[in-house]
Amino acid sequence: MYPSRFRYEAPRSLDEAIGTLRDGGDYAKILAGGQSLVPMMKLRFASPELIVDINNVPGLDYHRADADGTLRVGALTRHADLEWSPLLKASQPTMAAAAPMIADPLVRNRGTLVGSLCHADPQGDWAAVMISLGASVVAQGPRGRRAIPVADFVTGPFENALEHDEIAVEAVVPPAQGTRAGGYLKLERRVGDFATCGVAVALEISAAGEVIRAGIGLTGVGGATINATQAAAALSGKALTPEAIEAAAELTAQAAQPRTDHRGSAEYKRHMVRTFAARILGAAAPGGTGPATTTERAA
Amino acid sequence: MTAVYDDLGDEATSDIPVRRIRFTINGAKKIAEIEPRLLLSHLIRRGVGLTGTHMGCDTTNCGACTVLVDGKPVKSCTMLAVQVDGREVTTVEGLASASELHPLQEGFREEHGLQCGFCTPGMMMAAKGLLDRNPNPTEEDVRWALSGNLCRCTGYQNIVKSVLWAAEKQRARTPGAE
Amino acid sequence: MTSKALDEIKIGGLGSSRKRVEDDRFIRGKGNYLDDVTLPGMLHMEILRSPLPHARIKSIDTSKAWEIPGVHLVMTGEMMATRNLAWMPTLSYDTQAVLATDKVRFQGQEVACVIADDPYIAKDACEAIEVDYEPLPVIINPEQAQADGAPIIRDDKDGQASNVIYDWEVGDQAATGRAFAQADVVSKLELHYPRSHPSPIECCGSVADFNRATSKLTVYMTTQAPHIIRAAVAMVAELPEHLIRIVSPDIGGGFGNKVPVYPGYVMSILASILLERPVKWIEDKTGNLISTGFARDVYLKGEMALRRDGKILAVRMHTDADHGAFFSDAQPSKFKIGLMHSAFAAYDIPAAHLTARGVYTNKAPGGVAYRCSFRVTEAMFFQERMIQEAANDLGMDQAAFRRINFVADHDFPHRTPFGFLTDSGQYAKCLDVGLKAIDYDKFREEQKEARKRGRLLGLGISTMTEPLGAGNSREYDILGIKMFDSADLKVHMTGKALLRTGAKSQGQGHETTWAQIVAHELGIPAADVTVEEGDTDTAPFGMGTYASRSTPVAGAAVAMVSRKIRAKARKLAAHLLEVSEEDIEWELGRFYVRSAPGRGVTIQECAMAAYSNMPDGMEPGLENTAYYDPPNLTWPFAVYIATVEVDPVTGVWDVLKMVAVDDCGVRINPMIVEGQIMGGLTEAYAMASMQFITFDADGNCVGSNYMDYLLPSAWETPGFELHSEVVTPCPHHPLGAKGIGECAAVGGPAAFVNAVMDALGGTGVRNIDMPLLPDRVWEALTNRHDVSGAPPIRQD
């Protein structure tokens, strides 16, 4: 319940923050929302030597769409901002479905999307969502800015592609080529629980009803967030017919690498991945119920 | 203010980082000198001496420690105290005015929304966050907004009623809110 | 003339849903919980716990911890042993390690502690302690405990050659055997009631304050039973009892967790004695869940002998109880398996036999009565699961089968086959109320229709009576102390009053309810009565609050002491009215002359006279104490009916409706009673759906924090519909009240589980162990077999 000792810096600009990280020694951590980091520090699973708190850095608290539809989410945008965002509700069904499923309402008031991606917890929801959308993380460091696709950004459980003096400043979702559809379904045992499994599906659908682009990300069923590329590819160019949905759901289930544990058997988790994929795709199909989310009592 | 410590030699104390912060709590301006590792909940309880904010778990699940930071309900056990430098904190002790209780406080008493009372301050602060955002919530809205706060006594039914009671009272008080 | 009696509801008497007085401080954040206690010069204690479930301690090096600035004391088992405090006696006549000396026997066991200026520093120092362990084979269930060649966990005990703690039996084996020989149908069931934890939101803690100058030890402590703690401290620490003061401040929920004596309390007391400074220990949630009083963890199997027409002829039960590393059950009965044999008390069953075995395992000790009288929850759960399966085996309707076998209203008092005496009830009437509320026949129709469309609806009934309010003193004691309780009432000269009892509220609202009993008995408005509890220097000796015993025992004592006061007031009234006592009548708040009802004096006038105008020879003052030893337990009855829908694809299930019919006799404060029922139903839902502690094959505890020990939030918790139409007063309680705090937690789980099992009807699945997690329901549905929840968990 009591964190170890650390040094603390609260820089007022990105440059200052990057400088602090550069000079800060080996074990520095960036504090944004802190809703994963602080609990780990309290349990002493993490004992960083230096905390660089970026909450006083101006200009990182935004989410907005560019003229071409590119969505940008700043590093200090809280989950709650996204949960209540009219912009997301209107234009990003997969993100809008996922935002209310992150942790609990109080944690959502602090935690950030970009921070979740950096934390790279295989049971974290946002990575699957952002992978399904083909999103990138923009990192800024002494050598400038670079964009890293989320699929490459998450390098393993609790590991990301940032250099020690880089800060993830923004997540970027590319514009859609058609109409967006999709959703996020998560099996959790209670509000605030980590995902037993979760499936994010992002679709871009043409006026003719064909899938132009699909992305499918899986939460909690592997050593890291899974990018179900084959399942997504199988949907490309197809209408959301029952056959196409079934085939894609099966490929999604095959992409999962679940383990049997106290949350359920590998068999069950794989079955749930298949079920969720089919349910999201079914809801997105003509005559479906629209973006699927798990905000009803039952999954 | 006076503080007396055991003299442990210069070496022992020199590497303890201490920071000075200024913050507002329940309208009162404060200055504190703290170690950065101090949790906000401990600053409130042990530093300021406001013990209405309780701590119930180690893992950011129970919400007993919920306070408002710049108007938003957060779990104060999961924020560092240094992070409220320049910010405004409201605790359960800041709900009532000198002359009257907050509608939420009345609502919890009227609808038997508490038993042991340990989760109650956190529940009320989370509910305040909801009512500030949505003065006319449904039962579903209340249950959703309180889903980060655990109660072991009441079964929540009366807590939900308490919040709805308060919402109604607040709306009646604020002409044109309906 | 019309009566001048006071309006009982207006003065907050019996039956008034008076708003709670304790709320005034809680809603302002002005409660005084343990962690709010701060004393001058106070130090802070943190505990180092074992990461291993079973290991020999080769060495403990505390030198680096001592070097940390701000550390005052580092204690190990070795140091405790020099004071004969490394081990302490348990409430079940076993011993428990305070700090481990020879080996650790469960994950999370206390190995060392540090006392420092600040808890952050104490934690730093705990991390600096180096312990060298030699791992030993691990046992996490009774089967492993009894296997050939199993390591002996309690090798510290002379003559302990196995891991078996006891074998115990009750009932009539021969008669039961004869009944089974006559049976048309024998129905069987086997299940595991999982390990659970009461888990109040506030953890345990203590502030020990030993004053060398006065030799007085004051301990502020999260305890449901301060007087028992005083007695235990006197015995364990060998301190004179008059120099021990236990103060139980506001308690953030107990549910049985805060009955036992825990090692942390003992350590903080010794540390305060050694350092001569106050020492505060606040347990963290992991410490609470991993080491303190768990509940349940019982394997039950049984069979029921049935006649074709639905009559139950006999029941046979066996239980294997996993007690963890030390037999430290906190229970007051003389029965090894608590009140397990209260099972089937609601049914008229001629013969029954129960055998029980208890074993040691490498798990936390301290079985507690988690929102129940000890083991009643397991008993009633097994009972109602068995009843459902038996009715199914007979092809009978669930409600009809129960009705056939209920003890009839005219059969009270009724002796159960296990020897309990139930005294009152209207079981069939309660069931009717419940069936009507759930619209039973209509639901059965809907269920059939839904089935045709592939939807799985289910309805589960749980009907039970349970023994509440230990004890009577013949059969119930704690360390020999009889299970009575007490009340002390001081009526001031202005008619205001101070009431103290030996109970201790943890949210039950005693400050409100006790005053209502005084108002009922004396006509002193409840608002004029202050209630105090929890300080052994001022409260009369009592046994505390657990097992729903407050109203049955302490509440009765409040009524009895009020009656003593009224008896004296009557004499004062006669004196004031200048008539003989025999000519005086009482109505609420007032004595009057029978022949001239207009002539009277109020209770307040009598109180003034007790200090200013008493008759010659009368002792001044209006104060008294009552100790109440109940003649029997109280036996409330309850019907819980849940309807659910199971998603056949995912195994996720939802509660459609939950109806509760509780007959707990006379309700003193209906609002508070309903609050207790809703709380109990929520814990029932929790146990049925998500809440349990389990272990992996290596003995690692899964469920040692709220990320894995799941308590439902407002979002998951269903709504409840409560019914209070049926009132059968308890014949032996002075107010006719029965216990209520735990009924719903005891009887509720079976309603949810029976509902899900009913939804799975036709699949051949007989049992899924709680909690009914979606994956378990799905597995049962998919593979058409029972699903066990017994540890170890399955893992890749």
Image: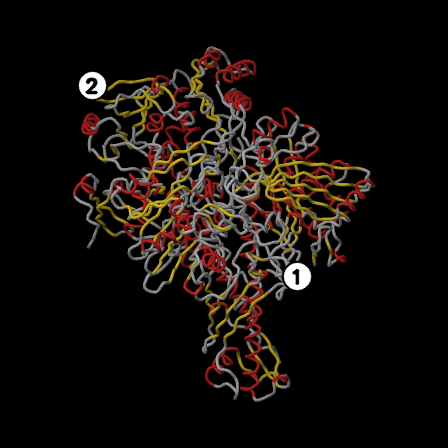
Q: Residue A53: image x %, image y %?
A: 25, 34
Image height of A251 relative to C581, above or below: above
Q: Disc number at residue C729?
A: 1
* Viewer-closest of C773 and C115: C115
In percent of width and height, residue B140 lies at: 49, 41
Q: Is residue B108 left or right of residue C274?
A: right
The reply to whether residue B74 is visible in this rendering is: yes
Identified by mark 1, the residue type is Pro
Which colour scheme appears in the figure?
A: secondary structure
Same-chain check, marks 1 and 2: no
> Relative to residue B27, is residue C99 drawn left or right?
right
Question: Could you tell me which residue is drawn at 69 percent across and 52 percent down?
Answer: C430
Q: Which residue is drawn at 59% across and 26% down?
A: C649
Q: How crowded is mark 1: few (under 14 residues within 10 Å), some or many (20 or more)?
A: many
Give the amino acid type for the residue marked by disc 2 in the picture. Answer: Arg
**Does the rendering let one see residue C202?**
no
Closer to the camera in the image, B7 or B171:
B7
Instruction: Tell me which corner region of the image, top left, top right, bottom left or bottom right, holds residue A162.
Output: top left
Q: Nearer the viewer, residue C572 or C220?
A: C220
What residue is shown with label 2? A143
- Where disc 1 sits, the SS reads loop
Q: Residue C416 carries which label?
A: none
Quarter location, residue A229:
top left
Q: Quadrant of the N terminus of chain C?
A: bottom right
